[in-house]
Amino acid sequence: MSDSIIFLDSNVLLYAFGNDAQRKNAAKDLLRMKPIISTQVMNEVISILYRKFGFSDDEIKNIYDFMMSNMTIRVIDPASINRAIRLKEKYKYSYWDSLIIASALANECSILYSEDLQDGQNIENKLFIINPFKNL
C-alpha cells in the first residue's frame, strides 16, 4: 500500500488531535504518508475542533498550517459534486460521504481511510475503503 495514493476522511484526521492514544498513533501514521484531503474535510475538521474540542483560534491556525504542510489539499469542483450525486444514488451513502468518495476518485486515490464508511468496500473498481481502526 505504500505506492497507493490515499485520501483521509475527516473522522480519521480528527483522531490525530484527540486523546485516544491508539487511534491517535494510527492517524499519525497515515499523516506520514502525505495524504490527500479535500477542502470539505479541512473545513469539517476545523469546525469540529472549534465546536466539540474547544480549540482556540491560535490552535486552529497551527493545525491549519500543519494540514497545509503535511497534506495535499484539493478544492472540490462541480464535476465532483455531480459525481457525488450519482454515487449517493448508487451506493446509498449520504451526500456528504458521497462527496468525500467523489473527491477521492477525482484525485485518483486508491484508498480512502474512513471509520464511518463500509470497511473493505470497493467503489467503482478504483477505490477501496479501509477502516484504519478496525483492529484496535
Image (tube, helix red, strand yellow):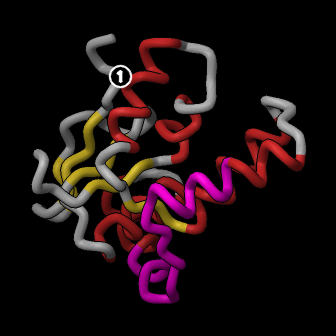
Residue range corresponding to the magenta coloring: 63-83
Note whether 96 is above or below 84 in the view shown. above
Residue at position x 29%, y 69% from top?
Answer: 105
Residue at position x 46%, y 48% from top?
Answer: 9
Give the number of callouts. Answer: 1
Categorize mark 1 by other alpha carbons within 10 Å: few (<14), some (14-19), many (20+): some
Q: Is residue 84 magenta?
A: no
Query: Which quadrant does the N terminus fall into?
Result: top left
19 vs 104, left or right, is right
- The image position of residue 24, as x and y in percent, is 48, 23
Residue at position x 35%, y 22% from top?
Answer: 133
20 vs 4, left or right, is right
| Front residue of 8 and 94 | 8
Residue at position x 21%, y 43% from top?
Answer: 121
- The image position of residue 48, as x and y in percent, is 74, 41
* Kind of residue indicated by mark 1: Phe
Note whether 88 is above or below 47 in the view shown. below
